[in-house]
Image (tube, rainbow, N blue to C red):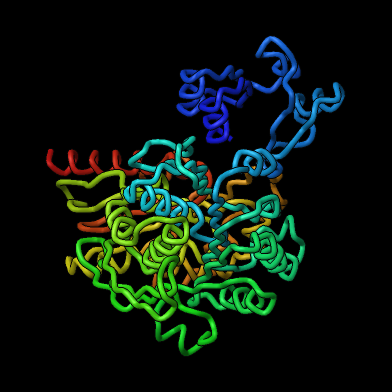
Amino acid sequence: MSGLARILLARGSQVTGSDMKDSTPVEVLRTIGASIAVGHAAENLTLGGQEPTCVVTSFAAIPQDNPELVAAREKGIEVIRRSDLLAELMQGRRQILLAGTHGKTSTTSLTVSALQTAGEDPSFAIGGQLNRAGTNAHHGTGTAFVAEADESDASLLRYEPDVAVVTNIEPDHLDYFGTREAYFQVFDDFADRLKDSGVLIVCVEDDNAARLGRRAMQRGITVVGYGRGDVARANHPDIPLGCEIVGEDVAGGGTHVTARLQGLPGQDDQQVSEVGYGVQIPGHHMVLNASAALLAGAFAGGAVDKLARGISEFAGVRRRFDYHGTVDRGPAAGARVYDDYAHHPTEVQAVLSAARGQVDAEGKGGRVIACFQPHLYSRTIEFAAEFAEALSLADAAVVLDIFGAREKPVEGVTSRIITEKIGHGTTVRFEPDFTAAPQTVAELVGEHDIVLTVGAGSVTMLADEILDALNQRAEEAAD
C-alpha cells in the first residue's frame, strides 16, 4: 500500500490514509506529502479537508468492519482493492508482471535492478524494499512498469500483462481458494490475461509451471522457458528454452551462472548467445529467479549484457536472506545472522538449503540454526508435516508459537504440531515465550554457524536481538 501511495504522490495526487502505528514507511510518506493518521476511525476519511474520491484497501489485511470502510460505504464513496489501483497505474506502460507461489519479490526486484542498469527507468511496485534503492516503489520515466502479481486473493487477474513470469506453482492460500484445483486455475486465467502480443515465461524446473506453459501454448500463447537444460530436455522438451542454465559455480556465498539465450526479441529464433552473471544471494532458487529476471528484462527491451550486469550488482531485498551481522569473537566467532520472509514449506526448504550450501562451501564446520515462526493457523495445520520436513534440514531449530495475523487462534493448535514431527537429527526447541527466544537461539550457536530468523510475522524483530545476545555471550566469555 505504501508503494502505491508513493507513486500516486509522485504523479501529483492527494493521498490520505491510516495505519495502526507510526513506522518508518509512514514517516517517509508524510515527508513526501501524504496525510496519515495513527489508528483507524471514520473521521480519517476527511484528513485531506474533504472526502476522498475513493478508498483503497487490501482484501487480505483489512477486515470488512474497519470503521473507515464502513463509513465509506455508508457515504457512497467507491471502495477499490489495491490490485484495482495498481492496474490503473500501469495503464499506458509496458506491463511486466511476475507471479508464482514463491520468489515473486526477489524476481521482481532482480528485474528492476537489471533494467535500471540497462539504462531504463521503469516504474515498479514490489512487495519488499530494495536494499540498494531503499524503496518498494517508484514512478519512472521509462515505458515499462514492473510489478508483482499476487495470487493470494486472485488479484493478479486484474492485470493485462505484456510479459508474464510464473516462477513456480504449489498449493497455498487454500483458506481463500478452498481447493488445490481452484488455486492452479487462477494461474491459467492469469496467462489468458496476456495481451495478444504478450509472452509467458515459465520455469521448466517446476513441473506445475511448465505444465501451465504447455497448456498456454495449446491455446496459442507464446511461451518461453528457463532453467537447466538437462531438466528441460528430460521433462519438458516441447517448451522453447529462452534461458538455459549451463553452469553454476558457488563461491564466497554467491553463485556465478553461465547461460545460453535463444529466441530473444530482435534475434533470429536459431541465434544462440552465451552470457555470465553473478547471483549474490545463495541458493539454486535464486539462480532461477535471476534467470527469469534476465528473460523478463530482455522482453521488456533491455540489452542482455547490461541486464546481466544489473543482476550481478543486485544487492538484495529486505527480509530475503537479509544479512544482519557477524559475531567477531567468543564461542560463536564467525557466526552470521540473517533474516528471511520464508513462510511456506518450500520457501523454508529453499532458504535452509541455501544456508547449508554456504556453510558446506566454506568448509569451516559451520552449522545451520533456524528460528522459525509459523504464519497463520490454517497454513500451519495444512502443512505441519511439510514444515517439519523442511526444518529437519537445519542442525537446530527453535520454533516459536504461531503468528496468527488475520486469523483467530484455533483451540488446541500450537507449533508443537510441527516440532513433534521434526527429524531426530535436528536439535529442536519449542519456544512459546517470544522474549526468551533470542537467548534460546544464542545458546545453540557455535563458531561459523549461520543463524536464520524465518517467517512472515514478528520473528523479523529477533534477528538483531539474537545478534546482540551472541555478542553479549562473547563479552561474558572474555571476562
Q: Quadrant of the N terminus?
A: top right
Q: For the image shown, how many numbered marks are present on the structure?
A: 0
Residue under the point 68% across and 59% down = 193
Q: Nearer the viewer, residue 362 or 443?
A: 362
The correct choice, above or below, for 59 with respect to 212 in the image is: above
Outermost residue on the bottom side: it is 234
Judge from the rendering whether residue 289 lies leftward or rightward of residue 259; answer left or right. right
Looking at the image, residue 387 sits to the left or right of residue 192; the answer is: left
Residue lying at the far left of the rendered structure: 478
Query: Which quarter of the rendered picture does the C terminus lie within?
Result: top left
- Residue at (18% x, 69% y) in the render: 363
* Residue 138 placement (x, y as % from top left): 47, 36
Q: Position of residue 439 (x, y in %)?
A: 36, 44
Is residue 337 visible from the viewing direction of this image? yes
Compared with residue 57, is residue 387 higher up or lower down, i.e. above or below?
Answer: below
Residue 351 appearing in the image: no
Residue at image position (67%, 58%) is 173
Determine the residue positioned at 53% across, 48% down: 147
Q: Quadrant of residue 87?
A: top right
Q: In the rendered view, would you say 63 is above or below 237? A: above
Counting from the top left corner in percent of width and height, residue 44 is at: 69, 17
Q: Nearer the viewer, residue 193 or 364?
A: 193
In this view, the residue in front, 435 or 182, is: 182
Q: Position of residue 123 (x, y in %)?
A: 48, 41
